[in-house]
Image (cartoon, grey):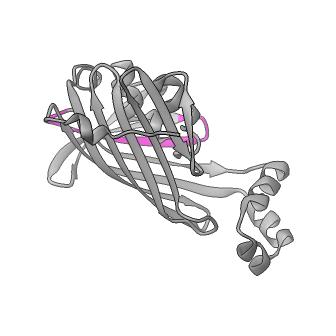
């Protein structure tokens, strides 16, 4: 798997992320384009979220310049490495998967994985790898033919502190706050919640990518 990402001349994918925290569910469409050694476009559009409006994240790195788009603001980033790191949290960890592996030339997930047989993943067959990370169990489905990631699943328990919960409440639309009330929202957000992440990826290596596909981000 590491060798497949390390040797990629180009890479493109279309992916769908289903994310659940307690009873809050979001669906995000993700697209990644890569031209070695350092040109990338990463784009994530959250189509549905229980509390927040649709959110769009974009990172474009080309011609020696990296820019990012978040909350409607375009920023010039010090490097692609910095941009992927800065957006890892708000992208629900997605910039830490294929985009990071392509840039760093190999898979980097700090866990000891156990092969748990094989299973279907779309039209392909995948090796099922299961590993333990702090507070969560991670499952990787790796294509037995191309050694590409086709599915990423994570499951664990999340509990946030009161200060963080209040910050999230302040960021919510006024209508959502009025509908439930701040006290009810605070109680809900500070309760331990089961967290599930399920990413399904359609990857393509070494196909032609025109420069125009990477696009531009201008302030």
Q: Determine whether 30 is above or below 143 in the image.
A: below
Q: Residue at x 81, y 65 (%)?
A: 187
Residue projecting furthest to the bottom: 179
Residue projecting furthest to the front: 219
Main SS of residues in magenta: strand
Q: Determine whether 174 is above or below 169 in the image.
A: below
Q: How many marks?
A: 0
Pinpoint residue 47: horizontal percent, then vertical percent. 46, 64
Pinpoint residue 82: horizontal percent, then vertical percent. 54, 25
Q: Is residue 61 magenta?
A: no
Q: Nearer the viewer, residue 175 or 74?
A: 74
Pinpoint residue 8: horizontal percent, then vertical percent. 22, 25
Q: Is residue 204 visible?
A: yes
Q: Nearer the viewer, residue 75 or 103?
A: 75
Q: Residue at x 40, y 20 (%)?
A: 64
- In the drawing, does residue 207 fall left or right of residue 99? left
Q: Is residue 149 visible?
A: no
Pinpoint residue 194: horizontal percent, then vertical percent. 60, 57
Q: Which quadrant holds the N terminus?
A: top left
- In the drawing, does residue 202 fall left or right of residue 32? left
Q: Where is residue 9, by image quadrant?
A: top left
Which range of residues does the magenta coloring cover? Answer: 133-146
- In the drawing, does residue 161 fall left or right of residue 5? right
Q: Determine whether 198 is above or below 42 in the image.
A: below
Q: Nearer the viewer, residue 12 or 129?
A: 12
Q: Residue at x 55, y 38 (%)?
A: 87
Q: Is residue 143 magenta?
A: yes
């Amino acid at each position: 798997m590491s060798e497949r990402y390390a040797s990629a001349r180009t890479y493109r994918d279309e992916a769908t992320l289903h994310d659940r925290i307690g009873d809050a569910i979001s669906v995000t469409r993700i697209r990644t384009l890569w031209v070695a050694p350092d040109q990338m476009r990463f784009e994530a559009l959250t189509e549905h979220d229980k509390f927040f409006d649709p959110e769009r994240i974009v990172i474009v790195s080309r011609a020696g310049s990296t820019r990012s788009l978040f909350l409607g603001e375009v920023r010039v980033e010090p490097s692609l490495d910095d941009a992927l790191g800065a957006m890892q949290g708000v992208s629900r960890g997605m910039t830490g998967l294929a985009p990071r592996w392509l840039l760093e030339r190999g898979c980097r997930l700090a866990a000891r994985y156990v092969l748990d047989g094989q299973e279907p993943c779309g039209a392909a067959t995948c090796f099922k790898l299961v590993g333990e990370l702090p507070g969560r169990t991670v499952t990787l489905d790796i294509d037995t033919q191309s050694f590409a990631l086709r599915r990423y699943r994570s499951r664990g328990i999340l509990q946030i502190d009161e200060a963080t919960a209040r910050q999230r409440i302040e960021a919510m639309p006024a209508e959502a706050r009025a509908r439930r009330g701040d006290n009810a929202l605070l109680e809900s957000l500070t309760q331990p919640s089961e967290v599930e992440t399920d990413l399904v990826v359609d990857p393509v290596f070494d196909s032609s990518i025109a420069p125009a596909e990477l696009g531009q981000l201008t302030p």
